[in-house]
Image (cartoon, rainbow, N blue to C red):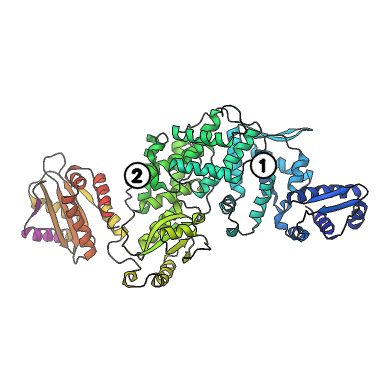
């Protein structure tokens, strides 16, 4: 809407009674024909606001507000952010692309001009730009003289392009509040105004509650929740699908990845419910398979409850090998040994398989900007680069940072084991905007750093309600997004994490929440740190040497292997012998001898196994502690001895297993300390 048109509408709203075209032409120094064109634009805009521009021949023009306050319309006129014409050309062109992707019919230039309040010339310029953008894609822009403009291309590509363009234009912080009708949680921003204007023009065919009911149906059937972003993508895909099918555009056949039976059946039920008044007869298999595939690769908000067996068709040997390489390389980057238990490994496999299928089929991500997430702490840039190269070389896929970051955050949240939380701690909830891997990552970091709180769950901000807080007995919330109308304290945090500030705020709150001696230990004590345990496991070695019955020679060889210099090796040998003089330690039932001592020749604990190759000579378990020996180091090494006696799997790996198996068993053992 041009400035002249706004002034004309303001005049009509303020004037009592009708105005003639000649009056308007004289007032604004324009011709009658120009006035008529301006009135067409005003009529279009008013119709979207529930008002009407009444034009009666020889009587004049007036605005009918139907009981509403004309001052509200004047207020809207004075807010340029609310209008489509305030859009920069690049964004307007993407909105025009959305408009064309949504409709399976020819659209006249004049319709586009009226929809976006721009001139026909501007529409032509925007379409020329879109042709260049679409030049390398499967979808093409077709101009039919005297009929209109339409997009042609395979239906799956049109659907995915609609979703990806929506995600380019509108952030999840605009989409998700709209999806859940959270008016109190939304600010009136330029993006929100533009999004609302677009929604008024697209006119989705199904009521929001009906689509939400189908999303809840999927959650109930599968037994887990999608992330907020996943639900948003599913919502818009279902609305688009119903509209496109009603207009005659269907996916008849599906040649790409086929979903498993569970997801195919669920997709069929959802589509039959939404299309029962639209489609007579059976729904094409292609429609069902595409929706099933989308359901199968949506981001999952509660991965602990996922049954991996439902995804077996997705996870092949290629995916498993890529996951192993990814975990090993990330461990090298972080100089730590990463061990994931079976479920964790399968979660990574599932996430990687979903990423590959998403990229192959053009299914976009819609999560928010997670920030740097302590970039300096976990080598995010190097990991992103490695994963990108791995996907390109092994799968021929090009991935953007947005495609990769969900998997990277998920990995960070998985590698940190959960630990036993002391009883009688403040019951705390960690929230992020959408409830994805970032919340779990924050949970693991805060749980490790602050032991005065019991973080019972990590979830999405917009799923939090007071009745939920009361049911769970939550006493404190730590959130990346402002939360209001909750009767418990909320600590707002941002990325990268300022751990010292969080600790101080928690320390200030705890006494008021639960007074008494139990909250004195707010910060982690200097016992065995996470890094000390990982370094200990990583440095647990397998020292190979030829068969040797003389224990003196074994000690000399081992000392040279462990000590940083020949001089210190002699000191270590003497300390080993001094301990041996007090009596040998041997587990007779298993034929395993133990060499152990305290020595000033080492400055960190050393442990491992001496292996004598293919001979029948039994292995020797060795452990060396620095002298003097801190209590936490003594505890670290004593766990090895105790676990040898009590843990069958660990004992077998010590007796004859490979080094990788020993280290995995050690991580399982030490998780109680973590």
Res 141 visible: no
Q: Residue 207: horizontal and vertical position, in percent? A: 61, 44
Q: Please determine whether, in this image, residue 209 is positioned above or below residue 564.
A: above
Q: Residue at x 45, y 48 (%)?
A: 301
Q: Residue 293: horizontal and vertical position, in percent? A: 49, 36
Q: Quadrant of residue 599?
A: bottom left
Q: Residue at x 16, y 53 (%)?
A: 622
Relative horizontal placement of residue 410, taking residue 629 as reference (left or right): right
Relative horizontal placement of residue 273, taking residue 351 as reference (left or right): right
State which mark lies toward you, 2 or 1. 2
Res 8 visible: yes
Q: Residue 377: horizontal and vertical position, in percent? A: 41, 58
Mark 2, Cα crowd under 10 Å, few <14 / some 14-19 / many 20+, is some
Q: Please determine whether, in this image, residue 8 is positioned above or below residue 506.
A: above
Circle 2 residue: 343
Q: Quadrant of residue 657?
A: top left
Circle 1 residue: 97
- Quadrant occupied by the C terminus: bottom left
Magenta-highlighted stretch: main secondary structure? helix
Q: Residue at x 52, y 60 (%)?
A: 481
Provide the secondary structure element on which disc 1 rests. helix
Q: Please determine whether, in this image, residue 292 is positioned above or below residue 571.
A: above
Residue 585 within the magenta-colored segment of the rendering: yes
Q: Which disc is residue 165 wearing?
A: none
- Of pointers 2 and 1, the one earlier in the residue sequence: 1
Q: Which span is picked out in magenta? A: 570-587
**Distance between mark 2 and mark 1 Cα atoms:** 43 Å
Q: Residue 640: horizontal and vertical position, in percent? A: 20, 54
Mark 1, Cα crowd under 10 Å, few <14 / some 14-19 / many 20+, is many
Residue nearest the viewer, comparing 98 with 560: 98
Q: Please determine whether, in this image, residue 595 is positioned above or below residue 342.
A: below
Residue 190 within the magenta-colored segment of the rendering: no
């Amino acid at each position: 809407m041009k400035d002249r048109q706004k002034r004309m509408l303001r005049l009509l709203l303020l004037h009592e009674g009708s105005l003639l075209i000649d009056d308007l032409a004289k007032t604004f120094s324009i011709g009658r024909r120009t006035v008529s064109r301006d009135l067409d634009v005003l009529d279009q805009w008013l119709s979207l606001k529930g008002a009407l521009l009444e034009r009666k021949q020889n009587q004049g023009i007036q605005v009918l507000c139907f009981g509403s306050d004309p001052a509200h319309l004047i207020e809207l006129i004075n807010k340029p952010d609310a209008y489509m014409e305030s859009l920069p050309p690049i964004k307007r062109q993407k909105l025009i692309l959305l408009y064309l992707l949504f409709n399976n019919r020819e659209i006249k230039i004049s319709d586009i001009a009226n929809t976006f309040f721009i001139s026909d010339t501007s529409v032509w310029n925007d379409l020329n730009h879109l042709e260049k953008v679409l030049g390398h894609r499967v979808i093409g822009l077709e101009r039919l003289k005297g009929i209109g403009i339409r997009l042609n291309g395979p239906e799956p590509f049109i659907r995915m392009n609609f979703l990806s363009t929506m995600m380019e234009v509108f952030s999840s912080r605009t989409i998700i509040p709209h999806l859940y009708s959270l008016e109190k949680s939304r600010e009136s921003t330029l993006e929100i105004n533009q999004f609302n204007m677009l929604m008024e023009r697209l006119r989705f065919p199904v009521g929001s509650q009906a689509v939400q009911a189908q999303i809840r149906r999927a959650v109930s059937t599968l037994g887990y929740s999608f992330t907020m972003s996943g639900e948003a993508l599913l919502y818009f895909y279902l609305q688009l699908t119903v509209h496109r099918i009603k207009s005659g555009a269907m996916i008849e056949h599906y040649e790409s990845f086929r979903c498993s039976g569970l997801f195919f059946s669920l997709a069929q039920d959802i589509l039959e419910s939404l299309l029962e008044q639209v489609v007579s007869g059976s729904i094409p298999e292609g429609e069902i398979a595409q929706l099933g595939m989308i359901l199968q690769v949506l981001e999952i908000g509660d991965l602990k409850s996922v049954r991996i067996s439902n995804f077996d068709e997705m996870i092949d040997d290629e995916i498993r090998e890529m996951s192993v390489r990814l975990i090993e390389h990330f461990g090298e980057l972080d100089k730590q040994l990463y061990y994931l238990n079976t479920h964790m490994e399968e979660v990574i496999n599932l996430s990687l398989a979903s990423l590959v299928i998403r990229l192959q089929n053009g299914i976009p991500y819609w999560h928010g900007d997670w920030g740097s997430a302590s970039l300096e702490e976990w080598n995010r840039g190097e990991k992103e680069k490695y994963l990108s190269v791995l996907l390109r070389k092994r799968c021929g896929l090009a991935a953007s940072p947005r495609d990769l970051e969900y998997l990277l955050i998920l990995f960070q949240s998985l590698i940190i084991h959960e630990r036993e939380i002391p009883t009688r701690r403040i019951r705390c909830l960690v929230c992020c905007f959408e409830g994805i891997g970032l919340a779990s990552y924050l949970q693991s970091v805060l749980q490790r750093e602050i032991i005065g709180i019991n973080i019972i769950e990590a979830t999405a901000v917009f799923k939090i309600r007071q009745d939920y807080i009361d049911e769970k007995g939550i006493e404190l919330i730590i959130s990346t997004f402002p939360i209001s109308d909750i009767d418990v304290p909320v600590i707002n945090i941002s990325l990268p994490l300022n751990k010292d500030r969080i600790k101080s705020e928690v320390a200030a709150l705890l006494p008021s929440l639960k007074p008494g001696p139990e909250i004195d230990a707010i910060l982690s004590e200097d016992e065995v740190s996470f890094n000390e345990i990982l370094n200990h496991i990583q440095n647990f070695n397998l020292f190979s040497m030829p068969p040797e019955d003389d224990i003196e020679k074994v000690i000399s060889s081992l000392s040279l292997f462990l000590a940083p210099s020949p001089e210190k090796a002699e000191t270590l040998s003497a300390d080993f012998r001094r301990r041996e003089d007090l009596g040998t330690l041997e587990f007779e039932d298993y034929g395993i001898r133990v060499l152990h001592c305290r020595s000033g020749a080492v400055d960190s604990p050393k442990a491992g196994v001496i292996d004598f190759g293919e001979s029948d000579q039994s292995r020797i378990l060795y452990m060396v502690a620095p002298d003097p020996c801190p209590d936490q180091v003594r505890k670290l090494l004593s766990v090895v001895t105790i676990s040898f006696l009590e843990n069958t799997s660990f004992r077998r790996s010590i007796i004859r297993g490979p080094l990788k198996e020993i280290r995995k068993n050690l991580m399982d053992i030490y998780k109680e300390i973590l």
